[in-house]
Image (cartoon, rainbow, N blue to C red):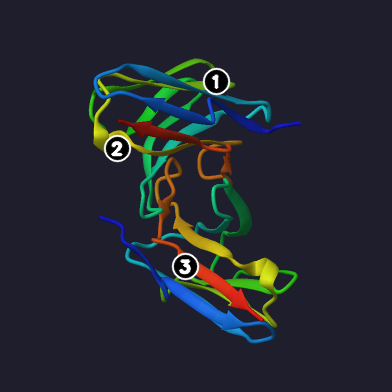
């Protein structure tokens, strides 16, 4: 059973398009996160949600909008995609804030 | 602003040798994590260190935390090829975000 799943695994799109990445966890966790890993493998937090409420929005352009319809899901919508958005996006979850985080398989986004 | 520094960033070592990866961080925290990432894969949790003096071991890897020195180490004993991967340390000071080091790319050669 997959603990944290993401769809799609790969996403190739043109500049200016709008796309979404979906994340689901079946661990019963209350806290979910989005991280961005750039081409140099550097990982940076984008958003944190606890019980469906946004806790952290870490200087991310407002073209990125997370949505948490319930505690098991945290989706990421990106408007007007730019070349610099190309990266691997990881969803993660933890039982509570400050607990061990478990990562999804990642979504590799390529903007052409 | 929290800074997390790992060194070395690249490490090539022979099978059977020992080595240590260092993780320094700039702000007080008692929550430090080590993750492993294989190429094209997700991050796998290796160790969770939650107190000063914490030491954890799994197979050929041992991690420790010194919160006073703001230092964690990941020690590799008698390296084998299967340990080749990128290793990240991450510090949590808010409870809501992991702050990662740049990662150490480890290559174990025969």
Using the numbered discs, state the Cα–Cα distance from disc 1 to disc 3 in whole angstroms.
31 Å
Nearer the camera: disc 3 or disc 2? 3
Chain under numbered label 3: B
Please rate how many residues cluster around mark 2, counting C-alpha atoms within 10 Å: few if below 14, some from 14 to 19, many from 20: few
Which mark is on residue B104?
3
Q: Is residue B18 above or below residue B35?
A: below
**Left or right of A83: which side holds B85?**
right
Q: Which residue is mark 2?
A: A58
Please rate how many residues cluster around mark 3, counting C-alpha atoms within 10 Å: few if below 14, some from 14 to 19, many from 20: many
Q: Quadrant of residue B48?
A: bottom right
- Relative depth, front residue between A20 and A58: A20
Q: Residue placed at 32% from the left, 31% from the top?
A: A111
Q: Quadrant of residue B53?
A: bottom right
Q: Is residue B8 above or below residue A73?
A: below
> Picture coordinates of residue A34 (x, y %)?
44, 34
Disc on the earlier residue, 1 or 2: 2
Q: Which residue is mark 1?
A: A73
The quarter of the image holding the C terminus of chain B is bottom right
Q: Secondary structure at mark 3?
A: strand
Nearer the camera: disc 1 or disc 3? 3
Q: Residue placed at 46% from the left, 57% from the top?
A: B90
Using the numbered discs, state the Cα–Cα distance from disc 1 to disc 2 in whole angstroms.
20 Å
Q: Residue placed at 26% from the left, 37% from the top?
A: A84
Using the numbered discs, state the Cα–Cα distance from disc 3 to disc 2 in whole angstroms.
24 Å
């Amino acid at each position: 059973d997959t603990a944290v799943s993401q769809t799609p695994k790969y996403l190739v799109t043109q500049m200016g398009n709008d796309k979404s990445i979906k994340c689901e966890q079946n661990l019963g966790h209350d806290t979910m996160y989005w991280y961005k890993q750039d081409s140099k493998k550097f990982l940076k937090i984008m958003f944190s949600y606890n019980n469906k409420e946004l806790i952290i929005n870490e200087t991310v352009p407002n073209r990125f909008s997370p949505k948490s319809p319930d505690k098991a899901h945290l989706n990421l919508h990106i408007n007007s995609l730019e070349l610099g958005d190309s990266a691997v996006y990881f969803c993660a979850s933890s039982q509570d804030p400050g607990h061990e985080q478990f990562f999804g398989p990642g979504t590799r986004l390529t903007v052409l | 602003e929290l800074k997390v520094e790992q060194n070395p960033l690249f490490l090539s070592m022979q099978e059977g040798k020992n080595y240590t990866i260092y993780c320094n961080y700039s702000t007080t925290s008692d929550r430090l994590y080590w993750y492993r990432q294989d190429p094209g894969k997700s991050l796998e949790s290796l160790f969770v260190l939650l107190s000063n003096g914490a030491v954890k071991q799994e197979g050929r890897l041992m991690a420790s935390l010194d919160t006073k020195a703001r230092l964690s180490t990941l020690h590799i004993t008698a390296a084998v090829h299967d340990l080749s991967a990128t290793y990240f340390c991450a510090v949590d000071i808010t409870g809501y975000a992991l702050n990662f080091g740049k990662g150490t790319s480890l290559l174990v050669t025969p």
